[in-house]
Structures are given as C-alpha cells and as structure tokens.
Image: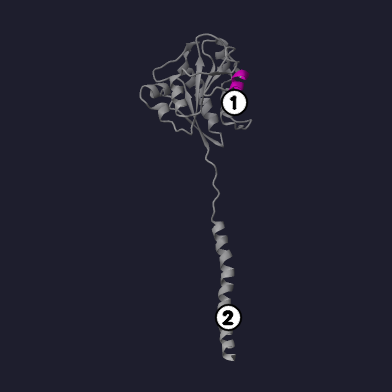
C-alpha cells in the first residue's frame, strides 16, 4: 500500500510541471498572434475627370475660342493643381489629347474600359445661346455631389434657368454606356461659351471654381491657403 502511494506521488510530480507549462505558454501564443494582426485602411475612391471634346472635335465655339481649347487651357491646369492636394481620394485625368466620346463610340474603348468602381466627372461648356450652367445627372434625382457642383456654378457663373441646377438625360450615347455599366457620373456644364459674361467669369474665377469643384467632387475641404 505504501509503495502504491509513493508511485502515485511520483506520477503527480511528473504531471504537475507539464500542466504548469501549458498554463504559461498558451496565453503567450495567443498574445503573439494578436500582436501580428495588421489594421487595414479603406481604399481611396477613384475619380476620373474628363475634359469634353478634343482630338479634332472642337465642340462649341464662342468668344474667339472653342470648347475643347477653353476647357484644356482654362480649367485643366487649375483642376490638376488642386487635385494633387486631395488626401482621402484618388483623382486622375483622362488623356486630354483624346476624346472620351470618340474613344467610346468609335473604338469601343473609353467608357467601356473604365473601372466600374470609378466615378466619372465630365466638364463641358454649353451652346448655342443662353446663360449659366447646370449638372447633367446620372439618376433621376441629384446626388449630394451633384448638389455641391451646382452650388459652385451658381456662385461663380449662375444657373441656367431652363434647368435650375440639374437635368436628367438619356439621349447622350456616351453617358448611356456609363449608365448601362453601372458607373456613377456627373456631366458639368460650367456655363455658355457663347455668352460673354459667362466666359469672363469662368476666366476670372478659374482658380476658385477649380478648387471648389474638387472639393465638391470629393467632399473634402482643402486648406484655405491652397494654391
């Protein structure tokens, strides 16, 4: 009986260290696994900005210039400057030497090749006669972004009374490609190139308009001293 009791004590002496070892090592392993977990930051939303017409398509004409030229000389440099200062989105520009509509409808490229998660913002100038601008929207009702863009037009150029900020159209073939592919877009008519007052305001306030447009598109406030 005494020998059996001694044998039991010997076995217990061997098992207890093993149990103690497990108690100390398991939490350490759990901590090490927790420590290696990396936080993932959400991907930045991508906006593609497009200057209308170009590549041989002059667009509307007025005030001694063309729509394609005015958009690329007046707006494009300013938009690029402020686009670089955005922190929470990614902004790229469609090749200004190309024409998105021609690339889409004649080459089956352009809007057919744009990533479905991209938001497309197209810039145009209106004609033949009238005053003010508006936003051509992709859905029947304007989004918050559309409303912000319309406010920029209203502040610096004025709104076209025929639309009072927005128009929903389904007869624009390139836009219909974007719509069928489920791509979000806005088409900004910044004013009439044929209207002298509109054109003068566009040139005079080009920097403020571009900065405000970038803020309206991304819903991100740029520094007051951004240049």
* Label of residue 74 in the image: none
Residue at the spot 49% in from the left edge and 18% down from the top edge? 70
Which residue is label 1 attached to? 212
Quadrant including the N terminus: bottom right
Secondary structure of the residue carrying numbered label 2: helix
Whether 145 is drawn above or below 3: the answer is above
| Residue range (magenta) | 148-155
Which residue is label 2 attached to? 12
Mark 2 to mark 1 CA distance (whole Å) = 78 Å
In this picture, residue 179 sits left or right of residue 224: left
Q: Give the image quarter of residue 86.
A: top right
Whether 182 is drawn above or below 71: the answer is below
> Furthest residue to the left?
107
Whole-percent x, y for residue 221 in the image: 62, 32
Label 2 or label 1, whichever comes before in sequence order: 2
Secondary structure of the residue carrying numbered label 1: helix
């Amino acid at each position: 009986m005494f020998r059996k009791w001694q044998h039991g004590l010997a076995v217990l002496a061997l098992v207890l260290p093993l149990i103690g070892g497990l108690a100390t090592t398991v939490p350490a392993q759990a901590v090490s696994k927790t420590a290696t977990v990396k936080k993932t930051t959400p991907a930045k939303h991508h906006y593609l900005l497009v200057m209308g017409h170009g590549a041989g398509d002059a667009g509307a004409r007025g005030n001694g210039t063309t729509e394609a030229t005015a958009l690329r000389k007046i707006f494009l440099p300013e938009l690029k400057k402020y686009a670089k200062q955005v922190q929470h989105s990614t902004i790229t520009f469609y090749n200004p030497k190309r024409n998105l509509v021609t690339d889409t409808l004649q080459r089956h490229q352009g809007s057919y090749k744009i990533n479905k998660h991209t938001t497309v913002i197209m810039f145009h100038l209106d004609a033949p006669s009238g005053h003010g601008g508006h936003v051509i929207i992709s859905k029947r009702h304007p989004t918050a972004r559309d409303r912000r863009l319309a406010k920029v037009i209203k502040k610096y150029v004025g709104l076209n009374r025929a639309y009072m900020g927005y128009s929903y159209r389904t007869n624009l073939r390139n836009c219909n490609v974007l719509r069928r592919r489920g791509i979000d877009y806005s088409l900004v008519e910044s004013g009439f190139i044929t209207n002298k007052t509109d054109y003068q305001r566009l040139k005079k306030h080009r920097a403020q308009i571009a900065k405000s447009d970038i803020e309206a598109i991304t819903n991100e406030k740029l520094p007051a001293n951004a240049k």
